[in-house]
Image (cartoon, helix red, strand yellow):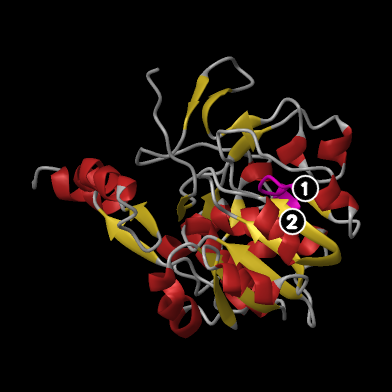
Amino acid sequence: MPIICRHEIVGEVTEVGSKVEKVKVGDKVGVGCMVGACHSCDSCANDLENYCPKLILTYNGIYYDGTITYGGYSDSMVANERYVVRIPDGMPLDSAAPLLCAGITVYSPLKYFGLGEPGKHIGIVGLGGLGHVAVKFAKALGSKVTVISTSPSKKAEALEHLGADSFLVSRDQDELQAAMGTFDGIIDTVSATHPIMPLLSLLKSHGKLIMVGAPCDPLEVPAFSLIIGRKTMAGSCIGGMKETQEMIDFAAKHNIKADIEVISMDYVNKAMERLEQADVRYRFVIDIGNTLAATKPSS
């Protein structure tokens, strides 16, 4: 402390350095979760800066010059062009912003683990900031998608608004029993503590359970639940810059946007209260530019 948060930043390029080639003044761009890495390790060499041991986060990280990174709660930000994502023409900046973290967090494992493919049956655990875009990406990639949730009240939202193929209530033992062994893969987006065994039972042999949510408590996973059926349990963390650009381009092509509520800066404390009550569908986006413009005295 003090920490100035905020990633998933979008805006317009106002100035570029003499050696910048990737973007030009006037381009619509974004910065996601990271602003630097070592650029010499195997991960960096393979466009996986997100797994670099010297990764520099967009906020509360230590930059190359020793200063603290402070994210995007400001009217301007300076970033290395390697960590700038080009936002395609016609893509709304506000609904593109959450894709720079939430979008790549689910897109990367869908691609890497071969789950986002026609003919694959994929489960998405949790219908929140990550889960709702996971449904959209999985559907666009051709998968059959089932939303897995503890909340029956989210069924209509999942099926009618987000386009999921089916909905499974994870607290309903009859529904779980009927679905056992029918999923090729599951993306678990839930960060609250929850049982893992029932999810593993839903997988086919050779199925994959991928964790992108981060519960604080240790997970309880009996070895035999993986051994029987040769199942895989793995994790995934955002994606490299090359894949993040790929994800944004794919989203623009398939009209994938995050469901958002745009707020002003002076609403942040109220938004945090609502967030604790899960009262948002599904991301708050702070309009810094218009907030600052509204507070400037008129001439």
Above or below for 148 versus 6: below
Residue topped by disc 1: 234
Label 1 near label 2: C-beta < 8 Å?
yes
Which picture quadrant has residue 53? top right
Q: CA distance from mark 2 to mark 1?
A: 6 Å
Magenta stretch holds residue 239: yes
Residue positioned 89% across, 35% down in the render = 42
Camera-side residue: 248 or 273?
A: 273
Magenta stretch holds residue 90: no
Residue positioned 44% across, 62% down in the render = 93
Camera-side residue: 212 or 30?
A: 212
Residue topped by disc 2: 209
Query: Which quarter shows the N terminus?
Result: top left
From the viewer's perspective, tell me whether residue 74 is left or right of residue 104. left
Above or below for 157 versus 65: below
Which picture quadrant has residue 83? top right
* Res 26 seen here: no
- Judged from this view, the residue extending furthest toward the top is 66
Part of the protein shown in magenta: 234-242
Residue positioned 46% across, 59% down in the render = 128
- In percent of width and height, residue 294 lies at 16, 50
Q: Amino acid at mark 2?
A: Leu
Secondary element under disc 2, as helix, strand or loop, is strand
Say few, some or many: other residues with alpha carbon within 10 Å of mark 2 (under 14 / 14 to 19 / 20 or more): many
Name the N-terminal-most of marks 2 and 1.
2
Residue positioned 48% across, 42% down in the render = 7
Camera-side residue: 283 or 183?
A: 183
From the viewer's perspective, tell me whether residue 97 is left or right of residue 230. left
